[in-house]
Image (spheres, rainbow, N blue to C red):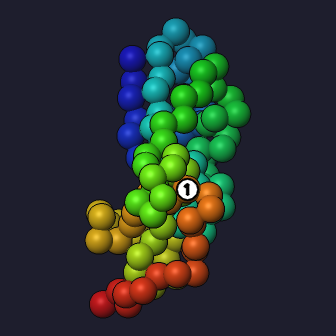
């Protein structure tokens, strides 16, 4: 078995490597965010999900309404697509409470 965490930070080569390993009988498990902070597909996750034999989507709990959270709300201003952070930078939100332009704090 091969496990890959934070797969959204890899490039598209991960999709090809996972496929080659799977054909050799290796079980490959990739975990990562499928959407970026603007709610856009976060490559290579869409391609991994499309080529996977099984997909399990695990949801968090929306901090605003308690519903199923499918989005990552960025709480700080930054135009960088990748901004590493914890609960001070991101919070889980549902589709209805997600507001990608709502960041409140400037990044230093």
Q: Secondary structure under badge 1?
A: loop
Residue bearing mark 1: 94
Q: Position of residue 97 (x, y in %)?
A: 56, 65
Q: Is residue 75 left or right of residue 23?
A: left
- Residue at the front extreme of this rendering: 65
Which image quadrant is residue 91 in?
A: bottom left
- Number of dots carrying numbers: 1
| The N terminus sits in image quarter | top left
Q: Position of residue 32 (x, y in %)?
A: 47, 44
Residue 76, above or below 82: below
Q: What residue do we see at 52% from left, 70% from top?
A: 81
Which image quadrant is residue 71 in?
A: bottom right
Residue 28, above or below 71: above
Q: What residue do we see at 60% from left, 14% from top?
A: 23
Q: What residue do we see at 45% from left, 63% from top?
A: 64
Bin the neighbour count of mark 1 within 10 Å (Cα to Cα): few under 14, some 14-19, many 20 and up.
Answer: many
């Amino acid at each position: 078995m091969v496990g890959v965490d934070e797969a959204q930070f890899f490039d598209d080569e991960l999709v090809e490597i996972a496929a080659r390993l799977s054909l050799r009988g290796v079980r490959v498990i990739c975990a990562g965010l499928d959407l970026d902070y603007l709610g856009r597909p976060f490559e290579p996750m869409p391609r991994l999900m499309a080529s996977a034999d099984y997909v399990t989507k695990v949801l968090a709990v929306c901090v605003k309404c308690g519903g199923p959270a499918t989005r990552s709300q960025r709480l700080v201003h930054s135009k960088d697509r990748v901004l590493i952070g914890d609960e001070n930078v991101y919070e889980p939100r549902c589709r209805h409470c997600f507001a990608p332009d709502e960041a409140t704090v400037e990044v230093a």
